Image: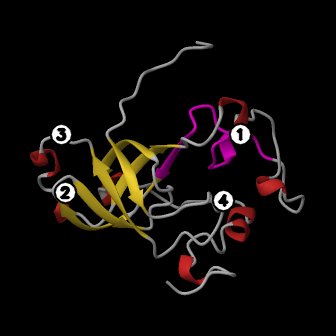
């Protein structure tokens, strides 16, 4: 299995939204997922009846040498325990893919207007699908305390980021 690869098409791109690869203050930002122009508009039929999307995107600014298969403290913070590659949600995992669950605001042709998509402007989208609540995790979701500590400002309003003037 070592060295096996698959090819995944890029179905669209993020337009507007975040820039600067920030770790926090991802909330309240509107962006557009612009599907490829060769896709028929009917591929989005019925999508507007759902509140959220599951979006898979590529960390396109990451480099292959960014992959880190060793245990390390999240955000290099020694207060948090060293954890393995697959306990992190960042570009250091081998496929360099991210998953987001933005709220769908509206659809205009092949443009899906969303908020709370934590992918930067220009990010390639490799898949999206509506969220079925029946497909979300079942039962109690458990985790240690460090993700809650680390992500305390993750979804804070981007316009309230220190050093940022109100837009």
Secondary structure of the residue carrying tag 3 is loop
Magenta span includes 85: yes
Identify residue for label 3: 39
Secondary structure of the residue carrying tag 4 is loop
Number of other residues with Cα within 10 Å of mark 1, as a class: few under 14, some 14 to 19, many 20 or more: some
Residue sticking out furthest to the bottom? 166
Quarter of the rendering containing residue 134: bottom left
The mark that comes first in sequence, 1 or 2, is 2
Range of residues picked out in magenta = 83-99
Main SS of residues in magenta: loop
The answer for how far apart the CA atoms under marks 1 and 2 are is: 34 Å
Q: Are marks 3 and 4 in contact (CB under 8 Å)?
A: no
The mark that comes first in sequence, 1 or 3, is 3
The answer for how far apart the CA atoms under marks 3 and 4 are is: 39 Å
Q: Are marks 1 and 3 in contact (CB under 8 Å)?
A: no
The answer for how far apart the CA atoms under marks 2 and 4 are is: 32 Å
Residue closest to the eye, 81 or 5: 5
Identify residue for label 1: 85
Identify residue for label 2: 47
Secondary structure of the residue carrying tag 2 is helix
Q: How many marks?
A: 4
The residue that appears at 15% across and 56% down in the rendered structure is 109
Q: In the displayed structure, does residue 40 sit left or right of residue 123?
A: left
Number of other residues with Cα within 10 Å of mark 4, as a class: few under 14, some 14 to 19, many 20 or more: few
Q: Is residue 126 above or below residue 99?
A: above
The mark that comes first in sequence, 1 or 4, is 1
Asked if one can make out residue 157 in the rendered structure from this viewpoint, the answer is no
Identify residue for label 4: 143
Image quadrant in which the N terminus is located: top right
């Amino acid at each position: 299995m070592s060295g096996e690869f698959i090819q995944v098409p890029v179905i669209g791109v993020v337009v507007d939204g975040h820039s600067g690869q920030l770790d926090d203050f991802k909330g309240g930002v509107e962006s557009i997922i612009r599907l490829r122009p060769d896709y028929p508009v009917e591929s989005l039929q019925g999508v507007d009846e759902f509140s959220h999307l599951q979006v898979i995107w590529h960390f396109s600014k990451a480099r292959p040498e960014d992959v880190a298969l060793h245990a390390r403290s999240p955000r290099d913070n020694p207060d948090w325990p060293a954890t393995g590659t697959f306990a992190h949600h960042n570009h250091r995992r081998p496929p360099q893919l991210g998953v987001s669950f933005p709220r769908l605001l509206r659809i205009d042709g092949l443009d899906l207007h969303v908020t709370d998509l934590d992918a930067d402007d220009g990010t390639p989208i490799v898949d999206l699908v509506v969220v079925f609540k029946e497909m979300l995790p079942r039962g109690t979701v458990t985790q240690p305390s460090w993700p809650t500590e680390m992500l305390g400002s993750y979804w804070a309003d981007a316009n309230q980021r220190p050093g940022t003037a109100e837009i």
